[in-house]
Image (cartoon, rainbow, N blue to C red):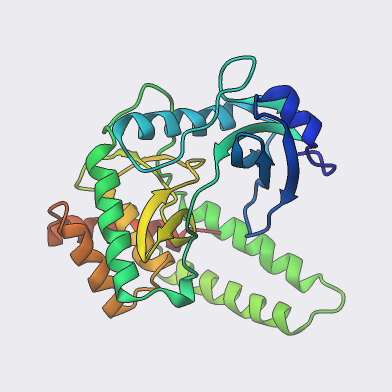
Amino acid sequence: MNAAGPTCADLDRFWDLGGVTALTALGGGSINGAWRVEAGTGHFHLRVYRSPDRARAERELAAVAVAVAAGVPTPAPRPARAGGVLARLEAGWAALFPALDGAPVPRAALTADHAGGLGHLLAEVHARLPRQVPFEVPGLHQRPVGEILTRLERIEAAILAWPEPGEVDAWALERTRQRLAHLRASPPADHAPTFPARFLHGDFHEGNVFFLCGTPHALIDWEHPRLAPRAWEIVRCLHLSLRLHPVLGQAFLDGYRARLPLSTPELADGAALYATLQERNV
């Protein structure tokens, strides 16, 4: 992605917006570039992809198209002047979406009501999305334990070679050695899921959900779709967004089960798969 960023002239050239009047860079931690666009026809969100690989952007936009067609509450990209929804700016591949009302709720501010809403929205997404899609979507890869050990050993060596280690380096070294000792003493076996893989959003968490008046009303960021058991995505959100908090987690599951059935064995199967993948995540 070009560090110079897009210009108002870029947007006027590629999209019919009635004249762009302002372009403001947004923060928020996204790994892609993001800008708020003010134009004669309304307010928009410009997404400039960090990767020069067009196929990555096209996969996300294909996933968005599937979701929109299925009735999932997610914004559809605006067509470009030349056709399609992807444009090649000087700053990189880009797509333009309508600006959304509301905002994500920060993780630390999530309540049981928010958690229940997240669970219900995820169930709605699972209910509406097709199980398979006509384009390539990655699955979940359980890396061999030997590969993880090699990576951790390289990290250990890099920390030890640091000329002036600080407090954070000492913590990282201790944590790395703990993981090495655990994996050497008790290498986890692969987990073969009992329940089938299907098309999923893949990155469902509170930062990708817009709330309006306390209720989730839109899901964004389809850059990481996955073919995986649905319970993997459920457990991932329980851990990533809710930190396995018992009250918030129960509210989330209650919200999910109010829309779709979810058995204890299926949830346990997803938890086992998620735990195995996290154990090997470096």
Q: Residue at x 32, y 68 (%)?
A: 115
| Quadrant of the image occupied by residue 74 | top left
Measured along the vertical axis of the image, is residue 182 above or below residue 6?
below
- Residue name at image x 34 percent, y 78 percent: 245
Q: Is residue 132 shown to the viewer in this render?
A: yes
Q: Residue at x 59, y 39 (%)?
A: 42
Q: Position of residue 188 (x, y in %)?
A: 37, 61
Picture coordinates of residue 104, whole percent (x, y): 48, 61
Residue occupying the far bottom of the picture: 167
Q: Nearer the viewer, residue 234 or 70?
A: 70
- Point out residue 76 in the picture as x, y percentages from the top left corner: 47, 34
Is 65 or 160 nearer to us in this picture? 65
Q: Position of residue 100 (x, y in %)?
A: 50, 49
In this picture, is 40 found above or below 257? above
Front-lying residue, 229 or 84? 84
Quarter holding the N terminus is top right
Label count reads 0
